[in-house]
Image: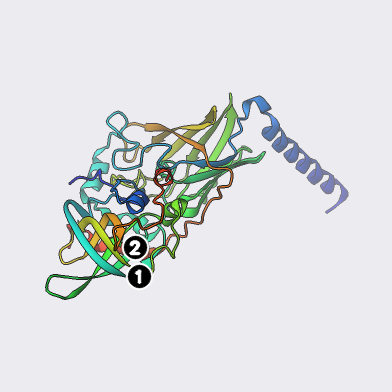
Amino acid sequence: MNRKALIAVGLALMIGVGAPILAHHASAPFYDPEDRVELQGAITRFVFRNPHAFLFLDVTDESGDVVEWQVELGAPVSLRRVGWTPDTLEVGMVVNVTGNRSRAEGTHGLCCVRMTREDGGPVLEGGRVREANTN
Amino acid sequence: MNKNNKLAVTAALGFLVAASATAIVAQSDAEIPDLSGIWDGGFSVRPVNGVDVPWGEDNFPKLNARALAYQEAWEETMAPKYDCQPAASPAIQYDPYAMQITQWPDRVLLRYEKDDQLRTVWLDGREPKATDFSIQGFSTGHYEDGSLFVTTTHFVFDIAGFDDYNGIPSSAQKVVTERYWREGEELKMTLTLADPMFLLEPTGYTTRWLPAGPDYRLQPYDCDPEASRTSVRFFPSKYD
């Protein structure tokens, strides 16, 4: 098991580039870095709380069923430093996410995500690379 | 209380105040570094903490059989951090968040943005009582040659008390020493850790902080138990 991979946070979300940065826990026990998933879904809930923010998406699968996916993000105390707020992601907003699939059977979780708006643009206008790199 | 008793009490109090003041001011200003301020310990300042940071090949602890047995039984979701139990020494110093140092004559206050933790380092010579066990332990310190030296004891047993990643517990025998000093704008710290209950020998690491921006204020962490435990469902437990 690759325990070195840590959960990605703001940089990935800001500029659409994955980055292994976070403090609270290692991602590899929970998510498989060898199993990358691409999804598009509508936001149903955005939990902006420490130690990790979570995003809930309704995703329509190949059979037409709607499945709720849960996306683990960074720590709000860090996300705030790069411009994120509880209002950055609105319910109903459609996003594209690519990330590591959760390991436990039957679960629908993602971490370490690259995320963009529906049109492929950055989630935050401007995608401030320098600030994203400063925690 | 008669007049003689009042005089005796007054004299005793006077002696205590004088002794205390002597302990506090015995050190010259030259010995006392300016450590005050808000310090950035984030990703841009130092490597991210993790399974092998700050613990690498050179300083990873040598574990005794008891610690190895704990590691064998351990799995990630047992970590009390998933229920918002705060990080403690020697891990909290390396978490990539801001820290504020306040220097008073009789104490130094270390306020961590991570987990909203406050440590008090007593400089007045007091000793811990038997009831002073806590997750952060009991810290005493002194200034010497431009550094702050801190010794912390009286930690409670912590099943993940070595760090956040390696499944190594720490016991009430854990002793953490820290030395803080300035190098230009940097704040440097060397930490050593001993715990004969689990470690065959002491180990340690050195790290640094940089000044946070002039307008930066510590943010509340306010750990949310639901958010903290949400990812646990994604972990395939070996005990299920």
Which residue is pictured at 42% across the width and 44% down the height? B96
Quadrant assignment for the C terminus of chain B: bottom left
Question: Residue A17, position in %: x, y?
Answer: 29, 48
Query: Which residue is pictured at 49% across the width and 54% down the height?
Result: B116
Q: Which residue is mark 2?
A: A54
Mark 1 is surrounded, within 10 Å at the Cα level, by few (under 14), some (14 to 19) or many (20 or more) other residues, namely: some
Identify the disc placed on residue B137.
none
Tell me the kind of residue under disc 1: Arg
Q: Residue at x 18, y 54 (%)?
A: A36
The residue under label 2 is which amino acid type? Phe
Quadrant in the rendering for residue B104: top right
In percent of width and height, residue B198 lies at: 31, 40
Image quarter in which the N terminus of chain B is found: bottom right
> Which x, y percent locates residue B66?
26, 43
Is residue B24 found left or right of A9 in the rendered image? Answer: right
Residue A35 seen by the camera: yes
Q: Is residue A101 left or right of residue B51?
A: left
Q: Nearer the viewer, residue B114 or B66?
A: B114
The residue wearing badge 1 is A45
Question: Mark 2 or mark 1: which comes first in sequence?
Answer: 1
From this viewpoint, is residue A102 visible?
A: no
